[in-house]
Image (tube, grey):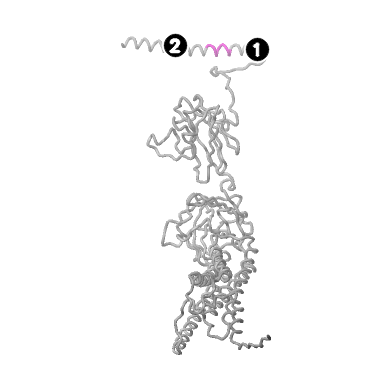
Amino acid sequence: MAPSMTVLFVTKLVLILQSMIREKLLAFAANSLAFVHYKLHGFATLNVSTVISGCIGPLDAEDKEDQDRITTERNTALVVTAGPSLHYPNPPNPDKVLYINKKEAPLLKVERGVPVTFSVEAGHDAPLYITSDPVGGNATSRNVSEIIYAGGPKAEGVPATPTELIWLPDRNTPDLVYYQSLYDPKMGWKIQVVDGGLSDMYNNSVLLDDQQVTFFWTLSGDSINIAARGERKSGYLAVGFGSAMVNSYAYVGWIDGDGTGHVNSYWIDGKDGMSVHETRENLTHTRCRSENGAIVFEFTRPLAPSCSGRVECKNIVDPKTPLKVIWAMGSQWQSGRLSVKNMHSVTSNRPVRILLLAGLAEAEQDLRPVLAVHGFMMFVTSGLLLPGGIMAARYLKHLKGDVWFQAHTYLQYSGMAVMFLGVLFAVAELRGFSFKSTHAKIGTLAFGFAFLQPINAYLRPHLAENGEILSRNRVIWEYLHIFTGRSALVFGVIALFTGLQHLGHRYGSKNTKGLTCGLILWVVSVALVVLYLEYMAVKRRRDGGADGHSGKWVLGNNEEEDSVDLLQSERSSKMESNSTEPMEVQLEPLKG
């Protein structure tokens, strides 16, 4: 073995020496020719380097990277097909890969909030899906977890019958995802997700007070995605849920000295820095950035916090209830202890009521005069006229004549007339009638029971004569008359309280607390008067019992039943008064 290896080594060495000698001889010959050329023509080109090829091949195009990238556009479909793997960007190469718009596994660039439409024509064996797994091919079969954002087994088709797949990347979609085949791994490539305009990323937007801040939101199941964008330069931007910054839940976005954005939640119960308390709300997907000096921040929070015992646990956002939003801006913000330098320099003048489900907003307004008149008329009805009519029928029968009946009738009819006018005022001011609020529902019940009374009186059965037994219809009517009259009063009083509550939700509670306390005092006062009158009535019946009259009330007696004779009392009283006068009969002899 040793002699053969020696011979092989010597042979290679000889070949190398021959190559070197050949290159030197060629260089010497070239230099000699150059010298002769110089003697003959006066100039020559001398090259002492190794002979190489001077062709450098085709130049790279300036947009070489963009040739393998596709930026999606709204309302433009991406055609997905399958083809051979030639230059797959993530080796080892599969045999077949996905082509998009005839490009082999390009990088896709999409914007959040802009729908992406795929026309899938890659075959029945290559359904398309968008996944968080870079390999694809159903990661769950490899015991690897993945998040599927769109697509699946049904997203497959052929050129003759393509399948359309629409995917909407939202603000919670990661910056990098992948398009892959559901069955075979590594057929697709990357999708770069970038932020688009806030108007594309969110379903709804409104301008807050003074049009200095734009508020964006999207309801998503049991959570809400929120963004706020300042329309002027500032160091921080804050939005609050409430009628004023005091006693409100606030969210502040700011950029620190290192250029990092922050979003924090706070509870504010005063007007100084010590009254701003940082909370631990469950804020996710928080972002904050500065666009030409204007602050833009985003976050996601649950509609109802899943906690208890902390102040932020009461910060519940009900999509069915108008959300009052205010804002403030300042030059500087920081975490932890705040000082005077963190005070706002500009703020909203009044809150804006946002209807989350409808996607609308309306400015908070002062109490409308017509609605104030409506409330006053309803108080006159349910606080004065209706209870006055009931008490007249119950406690004034000891007076002579039909004073009690006239008072009962006039007070009840006056109450119904004022109630009707009050409802008309409210409907005209609000330009329609709605049963959405509790106040409207209870008020409608009071209105209905009140206007059953004249119908009830018109259908009154005749009273039984002395000594006769009351008919069944008469007994039912008497109970119905008592029930409907007192129900109208009860629901009317409840409607007063719900009206004040509705007023507080709409215009702020600072003006309604005093009115509510005053209404409570009035109800208590009326109740005390009723107790006194009831005591006097019992005492009077006892005194009457001592004179031989019964002290018990019996359903259907003549005295009590006159209280329900609303339509024919005047005629009856006249007949009774006429019956007490002496009758004169003149007799004349018959002429025969």
Amino acid tagged 1? Lys
Q: Secondary structure at mark 2?
A: helix
Quadrant of the frame with the C terminus: bottom right
Q: CA distance from mark 2 to mark 1?
A: 36 Å
Camera-nearest residue between 306 and 208: 306
Quarter-wise, where is residue 353 in the image?
bottom right
User: Where residue 167 is drawn, which disc sits there?
Assistant: none
Q: Which residues are magenta?
A: 25-31
Q: Secondary structure at mark 1?
A: helix
User: Where residue 39 is drawn, which disc sits there?
Assistant: 1
Give x and y (percent) for residue 65: 56, 32
Camera-nearest residue between 543 and 1: 543
Residue of label 2: 15
Which residue is painted at 55% across and 14% down in the image? 27
Q: Residues within 10 Å of mark 2 (few under 14, many from 20)?
A: few
Disc nearest the viewer among 2 and 1: 2
